[in-house]
Structure formats: C-alpha cells, structure tokens
Amino acid sequence: MEIAFDADNPEWTEADFQRARPAHEVLPEQVLKAFPKTRGPQAAPKKIPVSIRLSPEVVERFKAQGPGWQTRIDDILKKAVGL
C-alpha cells in the first residue's frame, strides 16, 4: 500500500525533529487552557473503580445529560439501595 504525499502535511525529516520543541514551550497559554492542572487529592474517600456492564440505552441517556454521568449513576444506585 502506497501512502499518498500531502503537500500541506509533509513527512518530517530528521532536521524537523531536531528543531521540534514541546508544545508547552511554544504555546504555554494554549496548552494550559487545553490541559488544565489536575485536581489534588480528594477530600472525601476515593471511589472504587469497577467494571460494570450496562445497556447502551442507559449509557447513552446518562452521557446525553453531559459531564458527570458516572456520578449521576452512582447517586441513583445509592438511592436504590437506601444510602
């Protein structure tokens, strides 16, 4: 299989790699916006990572509500078991 040449995105040469710099050196503000600092240690006890199989419809419904969908599932499960 032959790879097509793309003039807008040519293959890097050894000289290109030598000139390359990490993104945080070249565009520090943009990198900080795209990759904010991670939060520190949790004040509350950490949750336990588990693997669970859910129907696609359930996952789609929760994900459609936006970020925090796993927390919403946890809240509903806690209510269901009386916590």
Image: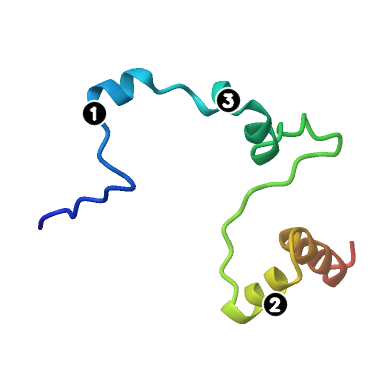
Q: How is the image coloured?
A: rainbow
Which residue appears at 86% of the width and 34% of the height?
Answer: 43
Quarter containing the C terminus: bottom right
Q: Is residue 50 left or right of residue 41?
A: left
Q: Is residue 55 left or right of residue 6?
A: right
Q: Which quadrant of the structure image shows residue 65?
A: bottom right
Q: How many residues crowd mark 1 within 10 Å: few (<14), some (14–19), many (20+)?
A: few
The location of residue 12, given as percent across then percent down, is 27, 33
Kindly report the distance in space between the C-alpha atoms of the residues bearing marks 3 and 2. 37 Å
Q: Amino acid at mark 2?
A: Arg
Give the mark toward the camera: 1 or 3. Answer: 1
Which residue appears at 89% of the width and 67% of the height?
Answer: 82
Above or below for 61 versus 27: below
Residue placed farthest to the top in the image?
Answer: 18
Q: Amino acid at mark 1?
A: Thr
Q: Is residue 9 left or right of residue 42?
A: left
Residue topped by disc 3: 24
Q: Closest to the observer: 70 or 15? A: 15
Q: Amino acid at mark 3?
A: His
The numbered disc on residue 51 is none
Which residue appears at 83% of the width and 72% of the height?
Answer: 80
The location of residue 8, given as percent across then percent down, is 33, 48
Which element type, helix, strand or loop, lies under badge 3?
A: helix
Kindly report the distance in space between the C-alpha atoms of the residues bearing marks 2 and 1. 47 Å
Residue placed farthest to the front in the image?
Answer: 7
Which residue appears at 77% of the width and 29% of the height?
Answer: 40
* Cβ atoms at labels 3 and 2 below 8 Å apart: no
The numbered disc on residue 13 is 1
Above or below for 73 versus 29: below
Residue topped by disc 2: 61
Kindly report the distance in space between the C-alpha atoms of the residues bearing marks 1 and 3. 22 Å
Q: Earlier in the sequence, mark 3 or mark 2?
A: 3
